Image (spheres, coloured by chain):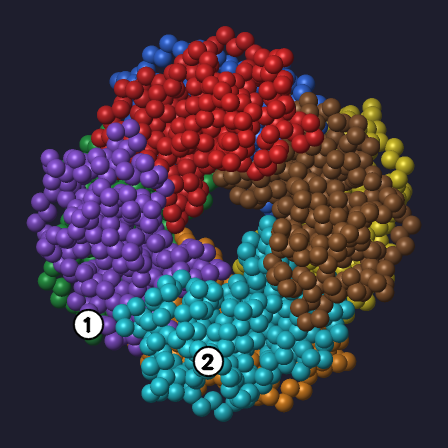
Chain colours: A blue, B brown, C yellow, D red, E green, F orange, G cyan, H purple
Amino acid sequence: MSVATLDFDRYARRGYPEAVLCQGKSVAQLVEITRAWRERAARQDLGPVLFTRVSPEQAEVVLAELPDAHHDETSSLIAWPAEPPRPTGGRVVVVCAGTADLRVAREATLTARYLGREVTEVVDVGVAGLDRILSKRDVLRSADVVVAVAGMDAALVPVVAGLVACPVVAVPTSVGYGVAFEGVSALLSMLNSCSPGVGVVNIDNGYGAGHLAAQIAAPKDKPHA
Amino acid sequence: MSVATLDFDRYARRGYPEAVLCQGKSVAQLVEITRAWRERAARQDLGPVLFTRVSPEQAEVVLAELPDAHHDETSSLIAWPAEPPRPTGGRVVVVCAGTADLRVAREATLTARYLGREVTEVVDVGVAGLDRILSKRDVLRSADVVVAVAGMDAALVPVVAGLVACPVVAVPTSVGYGVAFEGVSALLSMLNSCSPGVGVVNIDNGYGAGHLAAQIAAPKDKPHA
Amino acid sequence: MSVATLDFDRYARRGYPEAVLCQGKSVAQLVEITRAWRERAARQDLGPVLFTRVSPEQAEVVLAELPDAHHDETSSLIAWPAEPPRPTGGRVVVVCAGTADLRVAREATLTARYLGREVTEVVDVGVAGLDRILSKRDVLRSADVVVAVAGMDAALVPVVAGLVACPVVAVPTSVGYGVAFEGVSALLSMLNSCSPGVGVVNIDNGYGAGHLAAQIAAPKDKPHA
Amino acid sequence: MSVATLDFDRYARRGYPEAVLCQGKSVAQLVEITRAWRERAARQDLGPVLFTRVSPEQAEVVLAELPDAHHDETSSLIAWPAEPPRPTGGRVVVVCAGTADLRVAREATLTARYLGREVTEVVDVGVAGLDRILSKRDVLRSADVVVAVAGMDAALVPVVAGLVACPVVAVPTSVGYGVAFEGVSALLSMLNSCSPGVGVVNIDNGYGAGHLAAQIAAPKDKPHA
Amino acid sequence: MSVATLDFDRYARRGYPEAVLCQGKSVAQLVEITRAWRERAARQDLGPVLFTRVSPEQAEVVLAELPDAHHDETSSLIAWPAEPPRPTGGRVVVVCAGTADLRVAREATLTARYLGREVTEVVDVGVAGLDRILSKRDVLRSADVVVAVAGMDAALVPVVAGLVACPVVAVPTSVGYGVAFEGVSALLSMLNSCSPGVGVVNIDNGYGAGHLAAQIAAPKDKPHA
Amino acid sequence: MSVATLDFDRYARRGYPEAVLCQGKSVAQLVEITRAWRERAARQDLGPVLFTRVSPEQAEVVLAELPDAHHDETSSLIAWPAEPPRPTGGRVVVVCAGTADLRVAREATLTARYLGREVTEVVDVGVAGLDRILSKRDVLRSADVVVAVAGMDAALVPVVAGLVACPVVAVPTSVGYGVAFEGVSALLSMLNSCSPGVGVVNIDNGYGAGHLAAQIAAPKDKPHA
Amino acid sequence: MSVATLDFDRYARRGYPEAVLCQGKSVAQLVEITRAWRERAARQDLGPVLFTRVSPEQAEVVLAELPDAHHDETSSLIAWPAEPPRPTGGRVVVVCAGTADLRVAREATLTARYLGREVTEVVDVGVAGLDRILSKRDVLRSADVVVAVAGMDAALVPVVAGLVACPVVAVPTSVGYGVAFEGVSALLSMLNSCSPGVGVVNIDNGYGAGHLAAQIAAPKDKPHA
Amino acid sequence: MSVATLDFDRYARRGYPEAVLCQGKSVAQLVEITRAWRERAARQDLGPVLFTRVSPEQAEVVLAELPDAHHDETSSLIAWPAEPPRPTGGRVVVVCAGTADLRVAREATLTARYLGREVTEVVDVGVAGLDRILSKRDVLRSADVVVAVAGMDAALVPVVAGLVACPVVAVPTSVGYGVAFEGVSALLSMLNSCSPGVGVVNIDNGYGAGHLAAQIAAPKDKPHA
């Protein structure tokens, strides 16, 4: 294959499967990659594969190659095989500030789930009405790691990090307008969190957040590293 | 006077006295301005005058001209005459996130006080420990306007604005390091506040915040406009 | 409802009704939110609800759920119920620099009106021809709060703030090209206003400006806080 | 105490002790804070306290109040009591790209150690000579969490994250000149890491990285949350 | 011709032919330029001409004028005459980090080839799986100049530059999202490369990189300068 | 008229006619403005009116109101009346670096011409082939003011300013890609010109440049100021 | 001389003398340049030479070489010979917004004066009190070119440009703090001026503004170009 | 040694010796590094070592360890051994725009010389007076690679690249003020060069430029790669 050098050994080497970022790839490249994957998976345990940021046109060609894959439209994610593995390790709680953040939060949820964790999702608990987040204190405190997803002022992050003892993975979103600057304001706010215990990923990077959360909550008998 | 054209009519025109931003002015210019003010004030009611961002060297020359002025070192502010006017209008509450924000908060407090308002100051109630701000709910709700001063993630602002019904004047501070970017992160966070009812001023502009708060809480029988 | 946790108590808690920022929400999410609102409003006084930044496609589904709502196309705003409350409190004057700023100014006007204030609108009085703004001095001075809407150099703001004694809420707009930088130039100019008494909101945030102005001009017998 | 509202319950609430960011605080404020801490610690188990970014002048006054504290000059950190707790939980490996990154790496090392983890430090293994990092593969793979500290191109981070299965906490440093932009280049590079499993903290924020790493490697019987 | 002043003497003067950047030119302008070129080329040796960043609509009109030209769709490049010159000088190796970088890498490859060099292309060897690039050490070390093409963290560049003794031309790409900032993150990372021996060109500028590489690997008997 | 407050006195007051920036205005607003202008022009000498940045859809409605106007498609400008005034004052030379800069250069040319100056246009003389600009030395030196239009490195500006004694008005264009940053690179380069005598206008602001050039080359018997 | 290649022919070629930007030059380099100038000036008419941004230490060595030079401390400028030429051409008016802008305004004033123009200076007429600038309408309208110097919101520029018919040269200053961003806010505001007829120079570039103004107001019998 | 892992094999591996960037290193670290180098050099051919960006205090301690080293104060560089190797390979020409750029140009010159090339330096030939650079055409055309050093508008780079057939290494400098933005303007200008054949290095990175130039002009019988 000339367009990509897939890292087929990653599952064996790191214990986490490969993912294909579809944005920026042509349909022809995607077909070639999907086929190569399917053929190799017939001979080797590659773990589940995730296709992220799949456009509708791209989804069509991936699903043509892998008709039994799961396609989640909210997060533009395709997973194959469709069934996530049985959960092991600790518990991930994904919390998001507003409805518009849901597409990113869901990408984190599904990624962590396909990487083998149990995940709970808490939606639309921004701090403008503080009671919404305070009423979720128990579920937050049951987590081994929290993924907090927010745009704009991102004030959810220091508030959540101040309420829990576990690590918080923060995902800025490009929600908002004007000086939201496509997520930059939320990113800066998160990196400046006055509560410690926060690790930040790229804007709208639900995949990266779910991956990191899955690693943090991994079972302690690391079989792969 | 050749270095400045003072706006002596401002007190009569707008009802609020002039202030002299000392940063960027030479000692010689400041002496000339202070003398011109003192001489004019002998003939006309100019209201109290504030000298803001006064360096120690500048403070010395201003106090040499106006020995009975009040000099607050925390906020680098000089006021003359030293005695603030008797408070009228509504109540201003100034709240700040951390100890390092105090110099800006104090500038807001004193400005509003010299412009004739009653002011209460609440210090170091950042949201990392949410109980600190929640325990101040009553004093916040007694305000006609809140001035919220914070750097870094500035999460104090949407939390406070979500707790009160009155307007909030938000002042970003240059506290912090790295991507605090000398207050830009806090500024963006405030402009993106998910709670409405927030008006923002320049970074570290305690004077502007105190001035605006004094206008918002002005008595309704506007004598000056 | 799984996509949003509406803050139904906000009207009771803060005295100001909820608003739904439609930008970034899917049509399905918006339908779900609108229905939840309508059903709750049948059982509880939620005050008027505003849908802001409504795309034509979104407007269609909101109006399908709330056929008697008011839809203003200039500002892309839907209000329900259609009739604003009887005005109380002080007077809001909304002033804008150019014709292209009108969509933002109108959003401020309608927001303040649905939040219960009397509002006057003054259009296209940029400072290139100073007589335009000087001829409006009387209406400006009749205001309890001025909302000043401008893009590009935003010089309208310091000029207006220098003419009145009341607070000025400044709204930068994304009007212009090149180094207008989608409103950033106007935002910086406003935050640097040489006239004090200016609180700034996010670029194009007519809703936030109208809300803040309504709070500033609220009647003094605050029933809600 | 009027200058600070210390969060004395944080150790009980979150399981992690308070830290005092000294930068931006006056000597007088620091004296007041240190005394308040010492007095409270006589009555309540507050855990170890860390003073970070201590200038030489500040160190003097803190050490005058807490003469038996430990002062590390490389990282400008003071810890009290001087003896770190006995390590529990997993293993932290701190790795840095160049000699100039050491002051930040050391802050991470000490923070994680005072928060109760075992920490190993690997210095000056930037990717310009790839053999340096490849020769450390075993110690890296023994980690439960890696803290990677780098400035400039920060290429150490994706290389390390590609070599291990555990989470990586990435700390950009302000090392470098020109378009290093005081650490912004390294920060962006880290947030864009082509290897997943990376959580990023603020520029030069060794404290935050050490804290997050300590949480990630915490023993699973969480006593505090 | 009124729309362009073509530099027909460039081939004679610099030894390298002209190229036409099609982006930003109208179809009418492009027709005029193509015709002028063809007519002049009938009378004078202008060398091969490259049309870069050709939109499909533009390609159509260029190919209508020069039907025997070569059109590469991956890189949106048209070359005329279609046959590259016989290679002279040293060897160019073009290496790219991911599949999405291929369009830029191919532009570099073709440019260097039409300027008379032998070029080898190595695709999708990002550092997340270090074995991919290490397995190409031999082909990299056979180069007289390497062109390294990468987006996001651009860590490929310092790793490659640390492996070879020859110069590296680095091309940042606009691949990625969020803080990839359309290639700015990769650009900064490359300019900060901890390995020396790297010269950087504009984002997505495969043409410029191929041109520079062709000059670096030029035969030493410079006939043109 | 409610959407605009036209400055009908500007021609009398400043000696230069009004212009209507069409970008950002709705079709309905533009119709209203055009009609108001036409009606007023029947009663008062307003001078020629320019409509700039006219989209094809906008051009249609303006030309429907003013069928005898001149529409230049290269620069998206409409002028009415179609015939420019007889030239007075000095000579303007408009010079641009590349073909893609022509749309901005032409806007400058036409603006200066409709404001009453004689204008010469010199196209595609970027400094990559220095002979192109050196061969135009005579026409450049015949100018009373030069308008220099360039994108990307904008090196044309210091080279031209070093060749002439008259003022140079510099217009950055948004031509280019990557770190051209939509004209910001050219703007910075021009503001940093090592040759003095350069005044810069906004990116792509051919109108502003033509206006300023017309003022600089105005006849000395100023009838209007 | 090895450190500089002075452009001794500039006065003959462009009609304007050379200037030496002292910032960034070592004392040794400055001595070498000053001597070379003095020696050449003994043999050739080089016109007056200006040394700009002279530090006190630099001033000392320049004055040691040219003891009869004029040193203006407000603007950190040295001119030699001390006597400006007899004024020719039109009239320059330099106007500045605040006292802190004076050092830049004075540099413009002296530069234009040493380049042979008559200059009037108007100080501290910012738009916060509009009467200050309106009272200067007559002197502004007597100008052939206005130099407007302002920091922060720079609203002085569109107001002045709206009042006069002649060209305006705008100089942003680094006065202010926070989002004044060392003059960037003022620069953007000026480039976005809603009044046409404004040419902008670099931040704090009083020299460049004075030079451009002198060229604009040059006598029409250009002897040099 | 605990503070640094020196890459002693680099000379053998890449054919180019190590360099020590002194900025950001403590005196104690530098002493440790210098000693380690000296001791190793007694047993192994490490080639010449360069210490760059040496502060006066640092220079003292390095020279105490290596008393026979060469210290160039203009470029703040120390080389050991003091004698550069006998030149091989092609010719490097270093050209700079202004006197203030000399410190960076000299660093490039010395680096290339200590890496074994013959270097010619051409100073102060900025394009404001085009004759200065045109008079150096012959020396420029004798080069195998040109290093062009410039700040501010950096127009020297496209002009030089348009005059020669060989590669150009461009070094932006932090010379200038205001929107020179510490070299960013020059950097952008260079990356946007309208002449192809330009590779850019970090701001003020004379070392990197000299290194790259030495590689480009290396003798073709590569003994090391």
| Parent chain of label 2 | G
Mark 1, Cα crowd under 10 Å, few <14 / some 14-19 / many 20+, is few
Whole-percent x, y for residue D103 in the image: 40, 33
Residue B37 horizontal side relative to residue A176, left or right: right
**Mark number, residue C180:** none
Q: Residue at x 35, y 39 (%)?
A: H26
Mark 2, Cα crowd under 10 Å, few <14 / some 14-19 / many 20+, is few
Question: Outermost residue toward the right?
Answer: B221
| Spatial CA span between label 2 and label 1 | 42 Å
Res A223 visible: yes
Residue D33 horizontal side relative to residue C213, left or right: left
Q: Are marks 2 and 1 on the same chain?
A: no
Residue at the disc numbered 1: H138
| Parent chain of label 1 | H
Quarter of the figure with residue A142: top right
Q: Residue at x 67, y 87 (%)?
A: F223
Whole-percent x, y for residue D117 in the image: 43, 16
- Quarter of the image with the C terminus of chain A in it: top left
Mark 2 touches mark 1? (CB < 8 Å): no
Q: Is residue E162 above or below residue G189?
A: above
Between label 2 and label 1, give the one nearer the viewer.
2
Res F19 visible: no
Between H219 and B64, which is closer to the camera in this rendering? B64
> Of the residues shown, which amino acid type is indicated by label 1?
Asp
Between G149 and F9, which is closer to the camera in this rendering? G149
Residue B72 horizontal side relative to residue E51, left or right: right
Residue at the disc numbered 2: G68
Whole-percent x, y for residue G209 in the image: 53, 72
Q: Residue at x 37, y 69 (%)?
A: G30
> Of the residues shown, which amino acid type is indicated by label 2?
Asp
Which type of secondary structure does the marked residue at label 2 adopt?
A: loop
Between G11 and A126, which is closer to the camera in this rendering? G11
